[in-house]
Image (cartoon, helix red, strand yellow):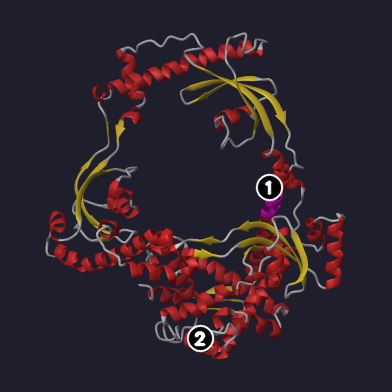
Amino acid sequence: MARPNISKTLVWILMGLLILGLGGFGVTNLSGTQRKIGSVGDVDITVQEYYLSLNQGIREIAEFTGSAPTIVEAIEQGLQREILNRLVSTAAVDHENAQIGISVGDENLRDQIISNRSFHGLDGAFDREAYVYALENSGLTEARYEEIVRNEMSRGLVEQSVMAAIKTNPIYPEYIIGWLGEQRDMTWVEVTPDNAAIDVPEPSEEDIVAYHEDNSAEFTSPEKKLITYAWLTPDMLAANLNIQEDLIRDTYENQSDRYSTPEFRLVERLIYSDAEFASKARESLDSGESSFEDLVAARGLALADIDMGEVTHADIGEAGDSVFESGVGDVVGPIESGLGPAMFRVNGIIPAIQTTYEEAREEIGNEIAEGEARKLIERQIETIEDLLAGGATIEELSRETDMELGSVDWHVGFFEGIAIHEEFQTAANEIKSNDYPTIMNLNNGGIFSMRLEEIIPSSIKPLDEVREEAIGGWKRAKATDLLAGEAEALVERLNAGSSYEDLELKKNEAFEIIRQSNGQQVSQTLVDAVFDMVLEEYRRVIEGNNVYIVRLEAIREADLESEELSSVADVLERQIASSLSNDQYKLYVDGLRERTGIKLDNQAINAVHANFQ
């Protein structure tokens, strides 16, 4: 079931302001008194919300791609549309909640705020001074922040109510699992020149010329760009840096969490309203009258609703000892959980990991060296830019700095040397003959500069250069045609009553083949064919230059009661329920948007964009 995501609000609205140092954003830079970019019903979409959402979106793109887009690029990628859609939807739900009186009480609001670790002191308890100080520095009043949290929690309640109404028809996942779990037994032979009477002739000159013309793509060289470049990466410098042992050891000790991870358990928690109810459920489980799944269903819940994910001993309080002393599949409890007596089921164990200093030393040393190398490169950038501004060539850069000189005949699909880097690929694709060399960044902290020497157009290689390849290609194609003809004749005889043995064909066997061939001894082409055949049918199958005869020997229906398929069905049922629930909530929100007035101020929106220029 969905839960209110308070931490996300805090990151975007509170911590975002602290990091950016915006303080009372929205007054000075954005047309003075402009406070909102639009409204949905009675709910305003503030300038602050839109700005921070845009900024967060740009940061996420930068983390994914390695470079931050400009506001224009972000808009072209659909970021503005995505953010406005989300903010409008949120405002529509807030407006509806206000109209029908849905809200959380003061006590729940208080519990939510004081449980937020961002406002805890060194002793782990809520620190009111820290709370007030953080809000003051972010430009938020207590009333405004509490309104944000209250709205977020109220939306969570509505989301849970709408999504909880979905019930999955069990026939649907059973049908899909039944289809996926079907199996086939098959036999097959590969038809080759050794078991088929074919004689591949030598091609005539006309045959070779025609093959060369008909398969021109096979003999076409791509357009190439001859590029001279100079580059410098952290790896080039790091190997020559001497990192002190004390620094490596200090780093290891300061990053103890990285090299020592606690044991985790995959746990489900089923909470009851009182101890008596929980005890009766335990008795039903122990007697075999009910399974754990039955107990979950009896509460009107799905397994996804009680899934805690990965937890540590400390995460589950009083239940920690019992849960972490249990094995996979064990159910412990009822134990007091803070939310009521609960039973816990262990679904998996992720062992603790301890990496010794000796094991981590080389990795840490390399990381420190690479970090120092990045700094050395950063210090050289200004000097290199001055050299380029003064007219230095790529060759002169390699002589006067640590940059290394190289050249490459680059074309689309070429990935060697410097061309393994996406930034070089992009620059090489866009470079023109009159471009002035500049310094460009690599995602690994390196830099490069480049010059286009020549463009060699795409062209078909003359037949004289590729005659042997053309002859080989013609022969392979001719052999496949002849083998296909022989295979078709053999299939006719087999379907008429002959056997593999009668025709002196050595068969191969495969059993319990499923629809996806991954890890199986037959290719997907043969699998697709056999699942399209009727029982005891023979069929010719061509895959590239290989020719096969396939026979369907047996059809096995899926065993829906098997442990493997049952677990897959459970996962699929959760996925279907989650998908339907999300669709249901989206329909609900879309309905609110349609009947609630939406107003957007393009001038205010453009003013926000101007702050990113």
Q: What label sits on residue 266 in the rendered view?
A: none
Residue visible at 41% across and 64% down in the picture: 62
Along the polypeptide, which appears first: circle 2 or circle 1? 2
Residue visible at 67% across and 82% down in the picture: 111
Could you say which quadrant of the image residue 154 lies in? bottom right
Left or right of 232, for residue 400: left
Left or right of 78, for residue 371: left
How far from the left and from the top, in percent, is residue 360? 42, 60
Pick whichever, 397 or 248, lies toward us: 248
Q: Residues within 10 Å of mark 1 (few under 14, many from 20)?
A: some
What secondary structure is the magenta-colored segment mainly?
Answer: helix
Q: What label sits on residue 134 in the rendered view?
A: 2
Is residue 366 visible in this depiction of the protein?
yes
Residue visible at 77% across and 49% down in the picture: 170
Q: Disc 2 to disc 1, how far (Cα)?
A: 47 Å
Q: Amino acid at mark 2?
A: Ala
Q: Is residue 318 magenta?
A: no
Pick whichever, 87 or 504, lies toward us: 504
Q: Amino acid at mark 1?
A: Val
Which image quarter is the C terminus in?
Answer: bottom left
Q: Which residues are magenta?
A: 570-576
Left or right of 400, for residue 193: right
Residue visible at 35% across and 11% down in the picture: 202
Instruction: State the SS at label 2.
Output: helix
Q: How many marks?
A: 2
Q: What label sits on residue 568 in the rendered view?
A: 1
